[in-house]
Image (cartoon, rainbow, N blue to C red):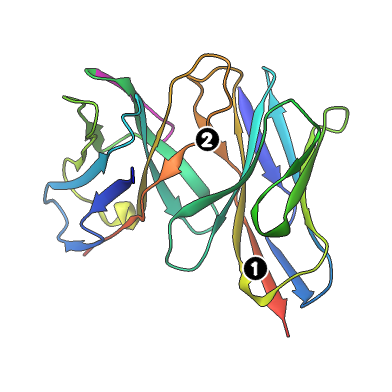
Amino acid sequence: AQSVTQLDSHVSVSEGTPVLLRCNYSSSYSPSLFWYVQHPNKGLQLLLKYTSAATLVKGINGFEAEFKKSETSFHLTKPSAHMSDAAEYFCVVRGGTSYGKLTFGQGTILTVHP
Amino acid sequence: DAEITQSPRHKITETGRQVTLACHQTWNHNNMFWYRQDLGHGLRLIHYSYGVQDTNKGEVSDGYSVSRSNTEDLPLTLESAASSQTSVYFCASSEKIAGANTEAFFGQGTRLTVV
């Protein structure tokens, strides 16, 4: 069994300040982890994925996530927020095989103030 | 370019009617999934398929069915639409490669309203 908890339903930052979106996971297998972004009335776009090659994963648009097995966390960060980052972000876990289903967190809505 | 498309993008239907949402992918992926998105719940898995003639129930499958007659398509049918099925529906596909962390690709979504 697997599950994902996104610790904040809403995060609000000012433009130019750092972004931290928190995610904790639970998985019976060595997990595959992803962050997806959804802009209003749009589909989901992959930001980054954990491939086990490196614990610090770089994604698109300056986002990064660090896999910490001891803390079962996969937090998403960005050094400097941009207005275009305003969206909903989903942390996603999949069990240890390519047959595994994706399990989504409940989402974090990021608001960026000018 | 390969893509995954859903149709229609918006639909309004009446309670009790049968409704089918289409999903077509040109990635040649074996895995296909249907999710529904509701406020406060994230995305929840309805049904999924790992290949032709294979279908499986997800966590919220009651009132829904799917069939997989070819690689490209996984239509989702609401047997008798209910107001509780008003939601945004997303189709997704992914490769089936053992040991690989392959991501899923999502369609643009279908907004279904049951009145």
Residue B62 vs residue A98: left or right?
left
Secondary structure under tag 2 reads: loop
Residue farthest bottom in this picture? A114
Magenta segment includes B33 = no
Magenta stretch: give its range: B54-60
Q: Position of residue A24 (x, y in %)?
A: 75, 39
Please name the amino acid that badge 2 sits on: Glu
Is B53 left, or right, of A22 in this rendering? left
Residue B33 against residue B36 in the figure, above or below? above
For disc 2, the marked residue is B103
- Badge 2 and badge 1 both on one subunit: no
| Place of residue B23 in the rendered image (x, y in percent of width and height, measured from the top left) | 25, 43
Query: Which residue is found at the position 53% from the left and 29% from the top?
Result: B102
Q: Residue at x 62, y 72 (%)?
A: A84
Vertical relation: A80 (above or below) A52: below
Which is nearer the eye, B79 or A19? A19
* Alpha-carbon span between mark 2 and mark 1: 21 Å
Residue sticking out furthest to the front: B1
- The quadrant in which the N terminus of chain A is found is top right
Residue under label 1? A85
Q: Residue at x 68, y 29 (%)?
A: A51
The residue drawn where x is 34% and y is 46% is B1
Decide if residue B71 is on the left or right side of residue B88: left
**Residue at the limit of the structure toward the top, as seen here:** B98
Position of residue B96 in the picture relative to residue A21 (left or right): left
* Residue closest to the eye, A39 or A5: A39
Residue B98 placement (x, y as % from top left):
52, 14
Chain letter behind tag 1: A
Amino acid identity at mark 1: Asp
Query: Horizontal and vertical percent for residue A34?
Result: 63, 40
